[in-house]
Image: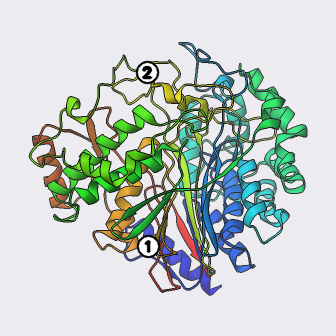
Amino acid sequence: MRIFSVIWVVYYASQIGASPGPKFPHNAVTAVCPIAAKIGAETLKLGGNAVDAAVTVAFVMAVTWPEAGNIGGGGFMLIHREDRPPEVVEYRECAPLAAHPTFFQKGDSPNSGKAVGVPGTVAGLFLAHKRHGKLPWYDLVEPARKLAAEGFPVSNGLARSLNRVLTAYPQAQFPDLHKFFGQPKGTSRWVLGMVLKQPELSETLTRIRDLGHDGFYKGEVAKGLIQSVVKLGGSMTLEDLERYQSQVKAPLRGTYKGYTILVPGPPSAGGMVLLQMMGILEAGGLGKHPRNSMETIHLFTEAARLSYRDRARFAGDENFHIVPSHLWEKNRVVELSRLLDPSRFLREEELGPPLPLSNPAFNPGESTTHFSVMDENGMSVANTYTLEDSYGNHHVSKGGFLMNNELGDFNWFPGQTDKTGRVGTPPNQIAPEKRMLSSQTPVVVLKGNQAFIVSGSPGGRTIPNTVNQILLNIMEFGMNTQEAVDFPRIHHQWMPESLRAEKHGEAQWENSLKGIGKKGMKVVRSPQGDAHTLVRRLGQKTIEAGVDSRIEGAAFGN
């Protein structure tokens, strides 16, 4: 009981920007969903390791945070153990076998079955558990099944999310969305404490609990998913589901002033962008000026413009396309840093070889979710997963789970790279069983062989910038974990040619942004994704949690 009372105070404090954040003596979980974080911490208390807790949290969030938590999507799990090499369990969705270069036509909707990628989440979680788990699979899925069957009281964050999506997607066009997530009878809006039950999802989770990987990719659940996709105009088949495999890969490695940075490689472009930005910033002298100074914001912006431009040129599924590794190597980032001019922003032609631009297409979605786990035996997990848009394609499959619209992350129209940020270069053109480009950037920072920082974020292309700034707030500017998470963020993704910046009342921050505008960079105000972060200082067992209050969140531990 003592643990729960302490954590509730911490959770409430995080919502009003209190600092420093909570600390835990042995292990910790932090996530946007308090229920999931709490159950993850209970898994650790029962003897589970960080992977066990991550599997539990992921399944629970498929029930309790449906806008991004999922079994119908995909993502990346970065695992660091002190007794084994680190690895990435990559469970990104892929294109169906029917895909071809002109698969998408003008007028195709991201809410159709045509936009649904072959899901990877269940395969990825099952593989991670098989390689690293301690507790029985049954015990890790059961909490989610029970929540779906018996229901749970919605939080303020979930109530806002449900009301928003139900208003935006009317019942006439999205009857299954309203059937599964509509307000209780006699009410017009979800409010704090109302109970959400999902009996069909409970039945699907029962099959996954009892049959593991095959409970999703074969049998009734698989048949129901294919029927739902085809009904909405998609081309996925049972063969696509049977052929899907998650993959184990070595993470990419970079460094920053003696720290080792571990990130997923392609099809995550987020990892390569993060390593390149950090290299440019280190070579460019980050830290010479205060964190909220115009000089520091200028340097962050230029590093992002250069790195995101390389993302557009080179990034794609490495099983189909060679992504040059020299992009983030020291020689190149030093060379790029020499282009920087503190008195002005570089012109487009100074950033690199020409990239032809076309008329705008739609932008990819920004709804994802991340959670971080550290256990007392030196294992850490950074997990980011997604449905693409908030609530995916806004349709619910037979079996009670939301379908993704992840094929929207491919280049729908070959050759069309535009000023909205849509990338149409060849590396990310759709092909059968190809993984689409991602910005997901779960990260583990090492000092020696000890995990120092575990972090990640949702937010589409803002993700690498968010993660970059949190890491450097801690490593370069000496902030504690909560301060690093709370500090306002900026984002530039090469195109469009504008800097997104969070609002903040501090005078120096606002004055610095005015100075950026006077240098010729358009500044627009926009929030960025939440980034729930854990830190264990070198030689210590105590874990600091940074709970991000931009949406909702909590940290629990033992």
Q: Which mark is residue 13?
A: 1
Residue closest to the eye, 441 or 281: 281
Q: Which residue is mark 2?
A: 361
Total tally of numbered discs in the picture: 2
State whether residue 195 appears in this view. Answer: no
Q: Position of residue 82 (x, y in %)?
A: 60, 75
In the figure, 542 relative to 237: above or below? Answer: below
Please provide percent x and percent y for residue 544.
Answer: 47, 77
Question: Which residue is pictured at 72% across the width and 35% down the height?
Answer: 396
Ranked by sequence position, the earlier of labels 2 and 1 is 1
Left or right, 355 with reference to 35? left
Q: 89 and 360: which one is in front?
A: 89
Residue mark closest to the camera, 2 vs 1: 2
Q: Position of residue 533 (x, y in %)?
A: 48, 66
User: Is the residue 239 above or below the residue 467 in the image?
Assistant: above
Q: The residue tagged with tag 1: helix, strand or loop? A: helix
Image quadrant in which the N terminus is located: bottom right
Amino acid type, label 2: Ala
Quarter of the figure that contains the C terminus: bottom right
Q: Which mark is residue 340?
A: none
**Left or right placement of residue 365 versus residue 335 in this view:** right
